[in-house]
Image (tube, grey):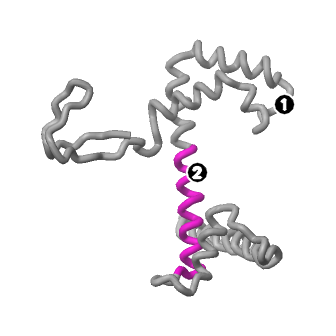
């Protein structure tokens, strides 16, 4: 059905894109010389790749792989958050109505929402924050092991118990 062929073609296209991104970052670094400062993760990775003192050498292909993981991870987490928001909103039409009302009042029906508009949309920001609170993409709490018997908020926690804390 051509899936493998299409996948290989897309992989080549994405590799060319990543090469272009790395070349742009390197060109900026070369142009700015002494004034250059890392502005993003790609800059940091390229800087590490050029560090001769590293015990394990980071090659350009590794920089591309890490960058690809960052892009994919960011895209996936955003998509999951949007899916959860839609799921929650469909169960509560009155919240959708209030969000639409805010959009109509602040943005109107003639244009799309822009980044600069977000600060003027407190209700929609609250909906987004509540979605992330209810359905975090990554766990916010790290597991801890109680090293001794303790009391926490009136509860007895025996030594060796797994607990979660901020």
Q: Position of residue 44 (x, y in %)?
A: 62, 69
Q: Position of residue 145 (x, y in %)?
A: 22, 47
Q: Position of residue 119 (x, y in %)?
A: 73, 30
Residue 152 included in the magenta stretch of the image: no
Asked whether residue 27 appears in the rendered view, the answer is no
Q: In this rendering, would 67 be left or right of 146? A: right
Q: In this rendering, would 77 be left or right of 163? A: right
**Where 124 falls versus 73 (above or below)?**
above
What residue do we see at 20% from left, 44% from top? Answer: 146
Per the image, the residue denoted by label 2 is 75
Badge number at residue 17: none
Question: Mark 2 falls on what kind of element?
Answer: helix
Q: Which residues are magenta?
A: 58-78
Q: Residues within 10 Å of mark 1 (few under 14, many from 20)?
A: few
What residue do we see at 66% from left, 61% from top? Answer: 40
Image marks 2 and 1: residues in contact by CB distance under 8 Å: no
Question: Mark 1 falls on what kind of element?
Answer: loop
Per the image, the residue denoted by label 1 is 111
The residue sitting at the right extreme is 110
């Amino acid at each position: 059905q051509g899936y493998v062929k299409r996948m290989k073609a897309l992989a080549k296209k994405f590799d060319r894109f990543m090469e272009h991104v790395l070349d742009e970052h390197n060109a900026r670094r070369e142009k700015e010389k002494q004034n250059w400062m890392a502005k993003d993760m790609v800059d940091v990775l390229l800087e590490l790749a050029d560090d001769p003192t590293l015990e394990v050498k980071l090659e350009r292909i590794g920089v591309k792989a890490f960058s690809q993981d960052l892009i994919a991870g960011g895209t996936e987490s955003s998509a999951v958050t949007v899916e959860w928001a839609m799921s929650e909103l469909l169960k509560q039409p009155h919240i959708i109505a209030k969000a639409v009302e805010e959009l109509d009042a602040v943005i109107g029906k003639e244009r799309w929402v822009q980044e600069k508009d977000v600060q003027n949309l407190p209700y929609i920001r609250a909906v987004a924050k509540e979605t992330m609170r209810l359905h975090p993409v990554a766990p916010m709490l790290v597991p801890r092991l109680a090293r001794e018997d303790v009391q926490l908020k009136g509860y007895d926690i025996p030594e060796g118990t797994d607990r979660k804390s901020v």
